[in-house]
Amino acid sequence: MPRKILLIDDDRLQFHLTKANFGKFQGEHYELDWASTYEQGMEMLMSGNYVACLLDFQLGERDGLQLIREAVASGSRTPIVFLTAETAERVDLAAMEAGALDYLVKGEITPRTLERSLRYALKLGDTLEALRRLATRDQLTGLLNRREFERILTEEEERVRRFKHSLGLVMIDIDHFKAVNDTHGHTAGDVVLREVARRAAAQVRTVDRALRYGGEELALILVQTDRAGALDLARRVCQAIEREPVIVTDTLALNITVSAGAASMPQDADSGMKLLNAADKALYAAKGRGRNQAVGFSDI
């Protein structure tokens, strides 16, 4: 099935010209969709259904630069090729600064230049995504890393203050993890950590975040989740880890448990840092009460 490209342009003629150019590509063939307004284009772009976007500068009362900035701010990572009427306006540089990966002058577009530009944008987009993943993901577990934890917690704290909803946080620690490493080696420990991370992440919604906080400690940031919801999720994680042994090798299966602490903002804390401290205190209460359990901050 051909990969899909989105054209955002208020000119129907440009759509037909672009479609005709697509039909003359020498390499990969793409399917072209068209959005004729800013609002429609933004909605289609944010759907995540497109591998790249061709974006016109002029879109009625608003322009493509504004759309790029809004899309990037909303989390879009779809590579964008900016279309300009002429280079004299210097919008090409502004587009690159806003987040476009390439630009084309409309009067100079040919099938060859358009195909080259799309191929370049897609390749550069893949490279940037790989670099972004290295910067934001823990290499062992694939979860978001400590740096992302701090950024997201600050971001979600601002949303709590602005929209007056709750934010849940669950801190998780693998019980007796040092003994796993000491007895079976660090390779076995890595397998255990990866599997615990996978099972924990499987319990959260797509809007939530699963992160490796450090060592054998994980964190779950739960948007619009109150005290009861955070504790319920923490208990489900404990059960998911305990339910089945972790298969390390064909001859080694380990029964692993975790302890978890849950807290929420604003019920248990009035800032992100205080929320982290509250969840940490609940976690250590869980470990102090015998491990393999979840404790809410309000219960200590």
Image: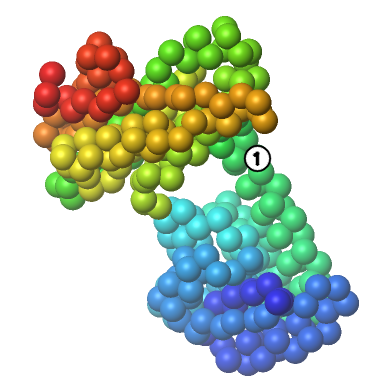
Quarter holding the N terminus is bottom right
Where residue 82 sits in the image (x, y, percent)?
A: 63, 67
Q: Can residue 150 be seen in this view?
A: no
From this view, report whether residue 169 is shown above or below residue 292.
below
Q: Where is residue 157 in the image (x, y as percent from the top left)?
A: 26, 37
Q: Tag 1's secondary structure? A: helix
Report which quarter residue 280 is drawn in. Answer: top left
Query: Residue at 76% of width from left, 82% of height from top?
Result: 22
Number of numbered discs present? Answer: 1
- Left or right of 239? Residue 188 is right
Residue at figure coordinates x 16%, y 40% from the top left: 228
Q: Where is 185 relative to 251, above or below?
A: above
What residue is drawn where x is 42% and y is 21%? 174
Name the residue: 59% across, 69% down: 50
Indicate whether 91 appears above or below 27: above
Local crowd size for mark 1, using a 10 Å CA cut-off: few (<14), some (14–19), many (≥20): few
> Residue reaching furthest right?
26
Quadrant including the C terminus: top left
Left/right placement of residue 209 relative to residue 192 reads left
- Please state which amino acid type lies under the numbered disc 1: Leu
**Closer to the camera, 186 or 52?**
186
Query: Percent from the top left, x then y, of residue 84?
Result: 63, 72
Which picture quadrant has residue 153?
top left
Looking at the picture, tell me which residue is in the foreground, 199 or 141: 199
Does the rendering let one see residue 100? yes
**As drawn, which residue projects farthest toward the top?**
182
The correct choice, above or below, for 68 with respect to 232 in the image is below
- Residue behind mark 1: 131
